[in-house]
Amino acid sequence: MKRVLSIVALTAAVFAVQSASAQTLKQVKDRGILNCGSNTGLAGFGLPDAQGKWTGLDVDTCRAVAAAVLGDASKVKFVPLSAKDRFTALQSGEVDMLARNTTWTSSRDTQLGLNFAGVNYYDGQGFMVRKALKVNSALELNEASVCVQQGTTTELNLADYFRANNMKLKTVTFASSDEAIKAYDSGRCDAFTTDASGLYAERLRLANSADHIVLPEIISKEPLGPAVRHGDDQWFDVVKWTYFAMLNAEELGITSKNVDEMLKSNSPDIKRLLGAEGNFGEQLGLSKDWAYKIVKLVGNYGEVFDRNVGAGSPLKIDRGLNKLWTKGGLQYAPPVR
Amino acid sequence: MSIELKAGSPPASVPFYNDPKVRSIVYQVALCLIVAGLVYGAASNAVENLQRARIASGFGFWDNIAGFDISQTLISYSNTSTYGRAFWVGLLNTLLVAGLGIIFATILGFIVGIARLSKNWLVNKAATAYVEIIRNLPLLLQLLFWYNAVLKALPDLRESVKIPGGIFLNNRGLFLPAPVTQAGFGFVEIVFFLGIVGSIVFHIWARKRQEKTGQQAPVFLTSLGLIIGLPLIVYLIAGMPLSFNFPQAGRFNIAGGLEVVPEFAALLFGLSIYTAAFIAEVVRAGILAVSHGQTEAAYSLGMKPGPTLRLIVVPQAMRVIIPPLTSQYLNLTKNSSLAVAIGYPDLVQVFTGTVLNQTGQAVEVVAITMAVYLTISLTTSFLMNIYNSRMKLVER
């Protein structure tokens, strides 16, 4: 019996963990397509439309990596992953990178063998309740039941918050956000909790979105960002600098519309970023014009934010913490030099 | 190659490499070595990969604080409990739903199975429709249907159905008064167990006496008196040491009392109804396997259809029914893992869902879960085999 079990466990281990050597960049180039772990469907971050075309902030992060590596933003295969399956999929090599509003935490960075390539959205966890409940603060939620998605930091923060404030809680946990929000909508729970951005996105899908309010409390820090496996520094650099290129482009005023004119710019910063000067692309293992392709094909961070979650989208989320550092926000990229 | 045989020599001496015994040993040893090599290769590969990716391994996580909540717990659990505790909560929830599911599915399955053989057209057709519809729809679909049907059909919290006796029913579940034992209740429990033992002893004595003398004893009434009457008297003498914790409507939820969550109800409904359809077919096949001559013989002795079925047909059919019934029980237990789709915190949802995700230790968690399901299945199978060997035709 014991022997049978160890065999079973070991076979599982072998299939679960594929070699994670420093080969991802080469593999992606050879394959000609980027496998990107995405959300199963969250408006503004990763959602396929009726034609199967994916849109969203995280989706554009994947497209930017494809643009930098393969020179074609459409060469991405999106693999929808639930919160509880996402890490195993990345660890086992099923996807090359993960871009599905995943919170950067210490245990994920160390114990789970992940590397976070940056924070593409600074978020925090909030609560949504029915207006009819007449609740104005999350601190009034003592003994409330809360619907939550399984396998998220949300689940842990929720328990912590109620414990810290001496409140009792009834959690109802669902495998996917979809099921959790449905259960909330049908009255199973008093409140629904997830990252604030997710609350606004999910509220749009409720039967009567006007009947629900998002409470003012933000109970946690949720730095969301793309992640890669441990042990492949080259690939880690590629994903990290793809994201930094988008931020630097916004800071330097380069957009998808003016990028061709910007090639003629005299600014050394712009020249270095767009590959007119130096060999920064080659140092990453990419082509000279990697950042040019990112901005040309996908856009800078500001454009991407605006069309997916910001003023140009149905979500209309304020940029808040996600403004550039030059405008009082937290988004800051190291320079290309 | 040819082997020369000398005439008259004792059984032809075969070279050792052609000796079937030696060969079979050599083949088995070789196979064992290959398997061992594969296992070793796989194990070292896995360990190396895990280390290279710097993914934590080992069972150290077991005693760490879990930090999440679980909606239904049979043992005390809070978000400061350990992952190990969460494992037991999940396991007990699985066993609860599987155990109750097996009981309900068996009762319903036998009723429907026998109803399918009824001569009453309506009963017969209703049973057939039940079996054909339930058996041919995927269980997951049925679970989602039950969950949504159960939830949607029930009134909102603020319009709870109030049933006299402190019972509430709403879309958060069914709330019942919870019994709270006080000092002295232990006597009642002791007498209750003594009553059970006593009635078993009385049952055996009565059967022996009937075999010897043919006289029947009032087994049912005596047992009733021993198991219910006696503890009741003790309960009254001890001063009724039992109170109830009544559920009360709070601002959000109903607090206190016993709570049956809709996730549990939906899973239990779905599993019982689905498995009952298969059990019904097993029962029907078992009954049809009993020769019609047995029934005719019983009728010719003047027995009525009821006792004939109960005393002659079903006991013989059981021999055919038990083995496939066992596999239905195993299916039900394993299918309970679909709980994950409707948010019931069973072992798979709690352990391979949340715990795996929070610790990231896929290999260990999956291995433990597989071991648990294997143990449950082997135990069920073992118990059913014992039962089967007792029910087998004893040839005299």
Image (tube, rainbow, N blue to C red):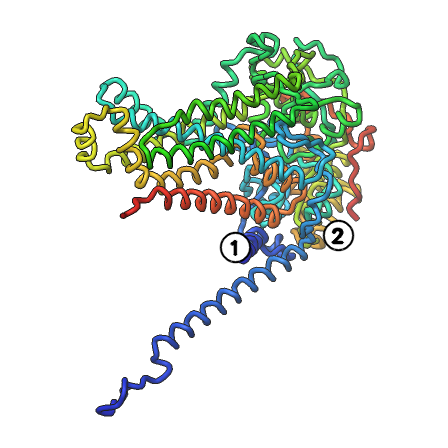
Mark found first going from the N terminus, 1 or 2: 1
Question: Element at badge 1?
Answer: loop
Which disc is residue A278 wearing? 2
Farthest-out residue, front: B213
Instruction: Say which amino acid is labelled 1.
Output: Met
Instruction: Say which amino acid is labelled 2.
Output: Gly
Query: Is residue A11 depicted above or below B269 in this figure?
Result: below
Q: Can residue B11 be seen in this view?
A: yes
Between disc 1 and disc 2, the foreground one is 1
Q: Can residue A191 be seen in this view?
A: no
Q: Where is residue A332 in the image (x, y as percent from the top left)?
A: 79, 37
Pick whichever, B383 or B219, lies toward us: B219
Left or right for A328, reference A227? right
Left or right for A264, reference B25? right
Marks 1 and 2, how far apart at CA: 63 Å
Question: Element at badge 2?
Answer: loop
- Quarter residue B219 falls in: top left
Residue picked out by circle 1? A1
Pick whichever, A262 or A285, lies toward us: A285
Q: Mark 2 lies on which chain?
A: A
